[in-house]
Image (spheres, rainbow, N blue to C red):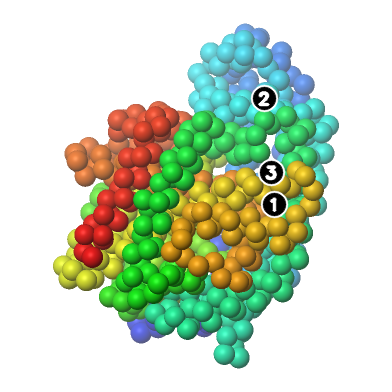
Amino acid sequence: MSIPRSPAEPVSAASPRDRLPVWDLTDLYAGTDSPALKADLDDAAKAAQAFSASWRGKLEALAVAPNGGDQIAVAMRDYESLQDKLGRVMSYAGLLYATDNTNPVNAKFYGDMQECVTVISTDLLFFTLELNRLDDTAMSSALTSPALAHYAPWLRDLRTMRPYQLSDDIETLLHEKSVTGRSAWNRLYDETLSRLTFGIDGEMKSLEAVLSQLTDRKQDKRKQAADALAKTFSANIATFTLVTNTLAKDKEIEDRWRKFADIADSRHIANCVEAPVVAALVDAVRNSYPQLSHRYYAMKAKWLGLEKLEYWDRNAPLPDADDAQIPWGQARDTVLSAYRGFTPQMAEIAEQFFDKGWIDAPLRPGKATGAFAHPTVPSAHPYVLVNYQGKTRDVMTLAHELGHGVHQVLAAKQGALMADTPLTLAETASVFGEMLTFRKLLADTTDPKRRKAMIAGKVEDMLNTVVRQIAFYTFERRIHTARREGELTAEQIGKIWLEVQSESLGPAINMSEGYETYWCYISHFIHAPFYVYAYAFGDCLVNSLYAVYAQASDGFAERYLDMLKAGGTLRHKELLAPFGLDASDPAFWDKGLSVIRGLIDELEATE
């Protein structure tokens, strides 16, 4: 359904091309009462029951039977088709919910669809469990079928969970109870966060609006926003503390039953990345804090004429920064021009998002905070959500999410089971899109003061993507470890938060009273534990990729697009090999970090 346009907080209404777009979800379904939606649910329910009746208990014998792999391939195609259909339903429900998750109608629809799809998919759960019970010899025999070999990458990734799989009854119980367990707590968190308002000068503002005020040129305005955030967060901290404690305990229980050795093992497996690779990344970044964030923020304090930065000064604009509002049309042109300069195909795909109603840009009460690109399903197309306020960072966010969108369009040909990319590699296209846009803007700027401000802005974005995200990962590890000893109070969580932030940001930033509550609005902690290191992974990887591109651009775009088209079929070693890169090499991460150090060196030379 189309979402009515909200007149709230437009960046510009000077011309039609500058009006902020609202996405059109009718490509998925015409509305919550759509006959097509009801038909898809009915068809999926019948097909899932028929699938169970046809294949349950038969895979073990088929795997070693003559031509049995071909029959399993038939089942795989039916299973993939059902995943696409159910994914379309949940994509529609999730995107509608994101437009206003304080709307009880949207919330009820989302909850109802979760329950309905969970019931239907319960009839499909046996399939992955039985596939994982096949021993390696039987699976190898079945994969001699060319039809089944098509799905070999998906089966490879599925079987990484084989050692941690529980009995069918327990797996079914966990699956069915997810709607009243983890999903319900996620929903409580989202709806609580979306309903928060923050009082400034007698006006109640949204979270996005107040976070944006932290980048105001005037320090008193920044402090005002910081105080408003702390006041509202403090008033609601008990709820956020309960949600965090409950979900951390829920994860610990499941991890213990599955016998994961480390609190982040399930995330590493989902990301198709080895734990030592992540550990090398984390160590490299933490060891670089003094050369990166500590050094930069000390310089920034001097630029702002301060002995130390307060925490609300961290994202303050520099004195020479251009803080003019950037109309939507200009943001579109900037990103598409940067993409086109790399390869016309990338720009052509991104342009569809603007022209076909695939982007939702305005701030609205109840709208999901932040930004995301939702892949939906291969039979449809992705959608992008941003909260556009006309700042340079908003243009970079648009470039980031469109990078995801381009990636998702290119990978869709892999089908519903293999289009999704592990999070570590999913961030590659988005961060690369940001880098292209930054380099385009920098190349078009000749004024030395403006160039300095732009480079500083890019350094801050990189610190937020690398240093801040690794600090978040460190925070999560400490929280989940401490939770195993009992419930954590808000004060304990806040203390850990301040310790980790102080370590990562350095002595040039003063952690004043109130900042101890700021952990509560980082939604990744709730929705996807340990997701955050993927941002640092992607940023360092892209820095290395971009260096290869800068040194020898011939043929690079073709290899890059081939990497995106692979979706989830290849692991990081295979994807990066054509570029001469290897993320399992501990020295790899220093290459990426050296790019940030080089930019800080350049800024330091202007002192």
Report the amino acid beneath label 1.
Answer: Ala
Q: Which residue is mark 3?
A: 481
Q: Quadrant of the C terminus?
A: bottom left
At x 21%, y 44%, the residue is 550
Q: Are marks 1 and 2 in contact (CB under 8 Å)?
A: no
Q: Point out residue 295 in the picture as x, y percentages from the top left corner.
A: 36, 57
At x 75%, y 59%, the residue is 489
Q: Quadrant of residue 340?
A: bottom left
Q: Which residue is mark 2?
A: 162
What is the CA distance from the residue labelled 2 to the residue labelled 3? 25 Å
Which SS class for mark 3? helix
**Relative horizontal placement of residue 345, taking residue 306 as reference (left or right):** left
**Relative horizontal placement of residue 511, taking residue 111 as reference (left or right):** left
What is the CA distance from the residue labelled 1 to the residue labelled 2? 35 Å
The label shown at residue 39 is: 1
Up the image or down, 108 lies above or below 408; here it is: below
Query: Dot 1, crowdedness within 10 Å: few (<14), some or many (≥20)?
Result: few
